[in-house]
Amino acid sequence: MPTHTPPLSDRADGNARSRILDAYTSLLLKGNHRAATLDAVAKVAGVSKGGLLYHFPSKDALSQGLIEQLKVLAQEDISDICNAGSGAVEHFIRTSVNSDSPLDRSLIATVRLAQDSQEARDVLQQINETWYAVILDTVQDPQLARTIQIISDGIYFNTAINLDINKVQMSGDIEEIVDSVIAVVKRLTQPTA
């Protein structure tokens, strides 16, 4: 495959690769992977098509870049969960609220890719299994770990489908729900006397 040299304006911008991935992610979030054409990504990213092709020589390479980005963000998230002062379970549940973070955006965009990509499905499964393993290591009960993960998924789903995230966050309702869930989970994870 030929190597494309980007125009000087694209090479001078060290953030072109990030802008391209952000543009691709945004287009995936608005539609599906078929709507996220190379031309559309270049336009949204504000780079020439040659500049895009320099960083990502094909749409498959662009998808691979998004998947790799998700892996990095997920690994950072897992590290944060493991090192959280509040404890892994509480941190896991609190961060289950979709806040439109880079991880949230990459995760949802990769879910869109998973409709037609086994690799995307495999990566999503691996991330899910790693979250489960961290929670299992903390609670030492497979059923409870799976229950916590399902609760987390429910929180994520319900906040992800809300079209006005800021309204949910500002209202405090979601915080009250999360606090209540954490209180219940803490009761479940405490050893019985």
Image (cartoon, rainbow, N blue to C red):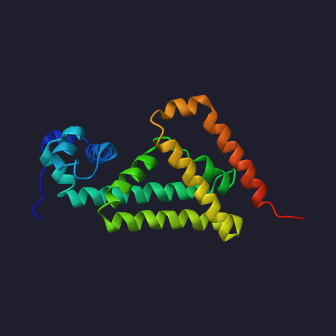
The answer to whether residue 172 is left or right of residue 31 is right
Check the picture and name the quadrant holding the N terminus: bottom left
Task: Tell me residue 2's x, y (percent).
Answer: 9, 62
Residue plotted at (53% across, 48% down) = 156
Q: Is residue 82 visible?
A: no
Count of numbered circles on the image: 0
Give the image quarter of residue 147: bottom right
Residue plotted at (22% across, 45% down) = 41
Task: Tell me residue 87's x, y (percent).
Answer: 69, 54
Nearer to us in this view, 126 or 174: 174
Task: Tell me residue 163's x, y (percent).
Answer: 44, 35
Q: Residue furthest left?
A: 2
Residue plotted at (43% across, 57% down) = 72
Q: Is residue 175 visible?
A: yes
The answer to whether residue 34 is left or right of residue 91 is left
Task: Tell me residue 191's x, y (percent).
Answer: 82, 64
Check the picture and name the quadrant holding the C terminus: bottom right
Give the image quarter of residue 88: bottom right
Residue plotted at (30% across, 64% down) = 117
Q: Residue furthest right?
A: 193
Q: Is residue 164 above or below residue 82?
A: above
